Image (cartoon, rainbow, N blue to C red):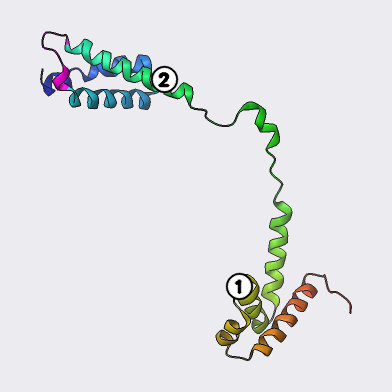
Amino acid sequence: MSREQVVELIPALRAFARILCPQPENADDLVQETLIKAIANLNQYTEGTRLKSWLFTIMRNTFNTRYRKREREVIGLPPDSTNTLVTQPDQEWSARAKEVYTALMRLPDRYREILVLIVIQGESYEDAAVICDCAVGTVKSRLNRARQRLREEMGEAVED
């Protein structure tokens, strides 16, 4: 047996694979896997055996192995667990985020910068002071004013 003889049988292998696998891409994968196994195991082929039968046996065994493996795999979720999965609607969150962004953009630059550095990026007061080239007390004061102005912009001003 030679590789050329194996190549000559590819059309027959494809036809057999299409019987086993209705989807053409799955059938082609099965043919490819069969050929790989056959070429890797040429030394196990016994002269005098019909090559076509040998290849079909490899294909059938490969298909059965795949089928058994697929039967053991659970794809998706068990039917009884779908009732416990609930996703909260995110429209309100998205709308609120847009409102906050719009209000943030209306703040003066010095307030917006401090708010972003400390609240969003998590910088310390000291690092924010170095970045903004000002005193730590100025950072704290700007942050307090920025929070107050943001509440006002959002319509949530608290009366003192």
Residue at image position (17%, 13%) is 51
Say which amino acid is labelled 2. Answer: Tyr
Q: Earlier in the sequence, mark 2 or mark 1?
A: 2
Mark 1, other Cα within 10 Å: few <14 / some 14–19 / many ≥20: few
Image quadrant where residue 111 sits: bottom right
The percent coordinates of residue 149 (x first, y second) are 76, 78
**Marks 2 and 1, how far apart in space?**
53 Å
What label does residue 67 carry, if any? 2
Q: Is residue 49 magenta?
A: yes
Residue carrying label 1: 122
Q: Which mark is residue 28?
A: none
- Quarter where residue 4 is shown: top left
Q: Is residue 118 left or right of residue 153?
A: left
Q: Is residue 96 shown left or right of residue 3?
A: right
| Residue stretch in magenta | 42-50
Q: Quadrant of residue 79?
A: top right
Q: Give the SS element for disc 1.
A: loop
Residue drawn at (64%, 88%) of the image = 136
- The three-letter amino acid code for the residue at tag 1 is Gly
Helix, strand or loop for disc 2: helix
Return the x and y of residue 29 as percentages of the image width and height. Answer: 32, 27
Residue 133 drawn above or below residue 36: below
Residue drawn at (18%, 25%) of the image: 39
Looking at the picture, tell me which residue is in the foreground, 56 or 153.
56
Q: Residues within 10 Å of mark 2 (few under 14, many from 20)?
A: few
Disc 2 to disc 1: CB gap under 8 Å = no
Query: How far from the left and from the top, in percent, is residue 88?
Result: 71, 46
Image x and y of residue 85, in percent: 67, 38
Residue for point 82% across, 70% down? 155
As drawn, 135 above or below 75: below
Find out whether residue 44 is within the magenta segment: yes
Q: Is residue 148 above or below residue 5?
A: below
